[in-house]
Image: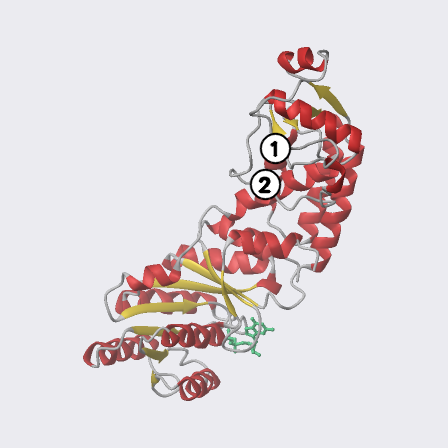
Amino acid sequence: MFESLKSKMKGLFSKGKKLEEEQVYRQEERELEHQPAPVDTPSAPSAPAAEAPAVQEPAVPAEPPKAEEPRLSRKEMLKLRKQEKKSGAPSVSHAPVGDSGKRIKEDPLDEILDELEIILLEADVAYPVVEEIKAGVRQNLVGRKYDRSYTLEQVVEIAIKDAVRDVLAINEFDFDGWLAEQQRPTVIMFVGINGTGKTTAIAKIANRIMADGKTVVLAACDTFRAGAIEQLTIHSEKLGCKIVKQDHDADPSAVAFDAIEHARSKRKDVVLIDTAGRMQTNSNLIEEMKKMVRVAKPDLKVFVGDSLAGNNAIEQAKVFDDAIGLDAIILTKIDTDAKGGAALSIAHTINKPIAFVCNGQEYGDIIKFDTEWMIDRLFSDE
Ligand code: GDP
């Protein structure tokens, strides 16, 4: 997944070697460096020099250390470092950025940031998001001091991951938590261009909701295509849930209204509305969507976008957002050779959260989106 972006990023991390660095010590540390080696005290950590070489650090630290790691005094830290120096292996992992250590100089960083920009643009990341990631990386590196046990490559990797994490984390959406708080029937409307995987995504969501013991009604409101009604009917039969449909060419808002009435009278939990997504007659489509929103008053309006469509998916989302106001996004087909751009930039660009990503054609191929999952996919070695 996102293979080309991943491999290019890896190449970029290695360019970290080019960065110049300067040693930066706090005054207190400088003084300690020139004192004889400190003597063991009862409070000192038990890390005798003889044991240190046995501890091997992984080549690339996965993440900055967690808060629960032992906090050592500066004196203890210096002692450990001296032991590490002797043994050639660091015995504890440290936060890469701190108030002493090495410091990155600004000029050589520009070259790395220019290359990062090209990599992200080639992966179809939207330009404002590229700018934001670059600014984040610069802020994470320039003038900041980092721990001497990290290599420059590792520091660049962590700075890039953190900047991407910041862009992704602007808003996450807990669909299950949200649904649990809604009155029934909860009405969810799905919009998006034909072929993006909207109908399949609706079936996946229905399957997920039903697995949680709730009842679902499907509303076949893409009355423009007879095939769409058939397709949703097949899903309703497979899933064992009710479908409300009318003939091809019926008024989609009327179908939505009927489905909600049915759910209300039968005390069903959730209505999932499929909508048309023809591109050719876009202005009619938008008017149709607006009317459906007025009639169905959906509790959630979800845009379904194809991650293969890159920046086009973002443009489509903007059109729907301007017309009806979106609440969340589902990004499909991330199992294909999507470049990663849409996944990285869609939520940030339209300022709406990604609720789910779809990674295949089976009902179970839907994953609740979260930032760390995405970071793992973008940067993992698999
Ligand atoms: P719609 O026109 O937007 O309703 O799109 P469909 O739901 O009919 O899906 C179009 C095609 O994309 C179908 O062949 C689906 O099986 C396929 N598809 C949908 N979601 C995914 C996905 O996450 N991964 C892959 N590989 N294919 C998908």
221 or 260: nearer the eye? 260
Does mark 1 have its CB less than 8 Å from ligand 1?
A: no
128 vs 336, nearest the viewer: 336
When the figure is inspected, residue 101 is found, relative to residue 253, above or below; the finding is above
Q: Residue furthest front?
A: 42
Residue 106: tell me if it is visible: no
Q: How is the image coloured?
A: secondary structure
Residue furthest to the left in view is 265
Label 2 C-beta lies within 8 Å of the nearest ligand 1 atom = no
Which amino acid is tagged 1?
Asn
Q: Which mark is residue 73?
A: none
Expressed as whole percent of the image width and height from the top left, the position of residue 8 reads 75, 50
State which quadrant residue 15 falls in.
Answer: top right
Compared across the picture, whether 297 is left or right of 120 comes to left
Q: Do the residues bearing badges 2 and 1 touch, measured as CB atoms within 8 Å?
A: yes
Residue where numbered disc 1 is placed: 140
Disc 2 target residue: 163
Residue 1 in percent (x, y) is at 66, 62
Can you say whether 361 is above or below 289 in the image? below
Q: Examine the image and state in which quarter residue 185 appears.
A: bottom left
User: Which quadrant would residue 26 be assigned to in this image?
Assistant: top right
Q: Is residue 72 left or right of residue 83?
A: left
> Ligand 1 is located in which of the four quadrants?
bottom right
Amino acid carrying label 2: it is: Ala
Q: State the SS at label 1.
A: helix
N-terminal of the pair, mark 2 or mark 1, is: 1
